[in-house]
Amino acid sequence: MKVNKIFVEENLQGHESVSRFCESFPKAELHIIDQYENYFQKVKKPYLQKHNNNSIFLAEKRGNLVKAAPDAYGLSGEPHYYYIHAYNCMYECQYCYLQGYFQSPDLVFFLNHEDIVESIRRTYSEHPEGRMWFHAGEFSDSLALSHLSKELPIYFRAFQELPRAYLELRTKSANTKELEKLDPLENIIVSFSFSSHTAAKKYDLKTASISARIQAMYRLYTKGYRLALHLDPIIDSPNLFSDYQQALKELFEKIPANYFSYISLGVVRFTKDVFEQTARNYPESDMLAANFVKSFDNKVRYSKPLRDKILYNMRDMILRMGITKEKIYLCMED
């Protein structure tokens, strides 16, 4: 990743993470600013400028630090929340909703993790009984640059003291070095987005390969980490099920299928704006050749019969491979 500029909020100049980012991108111009909101997205920047014109903002997150997750975001029957530790991603998945969400692909890293933890604690206290969930990775990959942000120990210490709270770290990265320095916790689950080798090469641009993700999961498995899978978004193709079966077979040969805490299934979907942005950014992508329709939630999706066929057959496949039905849920489906 090429970074041309690093913007640092003035009250964070002495923060140790600032030094790490600056040392990692020594050619980047350093700019001291008042608040990132006064600069980030103020000039619209095309998404694909991330190829050669990236900026990083190091800032404090203000406002609502923990938000309720939408329906069908995780296992049903329990409250789900997500916290925001960063905006945007170093990867370039063709279907990514971030290309139509922000007006800039620049990366923002929030460094006031203690404030985020305090908000998590307050939310936890509002649910005095039962299990609840917090998710990282909604607006940025939770592991990709964790060796620079170094926030993981802060959350591990916090969740040690929140036994009814479960933390899910969502990722497409193979960067597990920071996790491997920590002792796994029963209530922290590392979940990997997973697809076939073919689909990842076509659509998950600049991410870790499926083979690299399998190796990363295996490293965490040997250390005792709890793991989960997101087969999402599934993109229709002529060899969809055989391609997925081969990748899953490789994974389950290294890690027993039922070791995974849960598996989500979801079919590719877009908001109208993101669909239009994707078509501009990747006009030659065969992902766009399918017949998309406006769906029950106003998102752009495959027709319901095609979605049902994909989800039914994918669910049947992973059941036959050893996953119990209680561990499978459909992500963002009616």
Image (cartoon, rainbow, N blue to C red):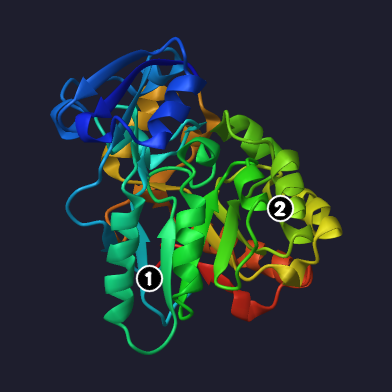
Between 184 and 259, the one lying in front of the other is 184
- On screen, 245 above or below 166? above
Q: Secondary structure at mark 2?
A: helix
Between 177 and 264, the one lying in front of the other is 177
How many dots with numbers? 2
Residue 117: percent from the left, percent from the top? 35, 61
Tell me the quadrant of the picture where the C terminus can be found: bottom left
Residue 80 is marked as 1
Residue 249 is marked as none
**What kind of residue is marked 2?**
Met
Report if residue 70 is visible in the image. no
Residue at image location 49% in from the left, 64% down from the top: 157
In this rendering, would 218 be left or right of 302? right
Residue 217 is marked as 2
Between 74 and 110, the one lying in front of the other is 110
Badge 2 crowding class, 10 Å Cα cut-off, few under 14, some 14 to 19, many 20 or more, is many
- On screen, 235 above or below 305? above
In this rendering, would 83 be left or right of 10? right
Farthest residue in the front direction?
14
Report if residue 164 is visible in the image. yes
- On screen, 281 above or below 179? above
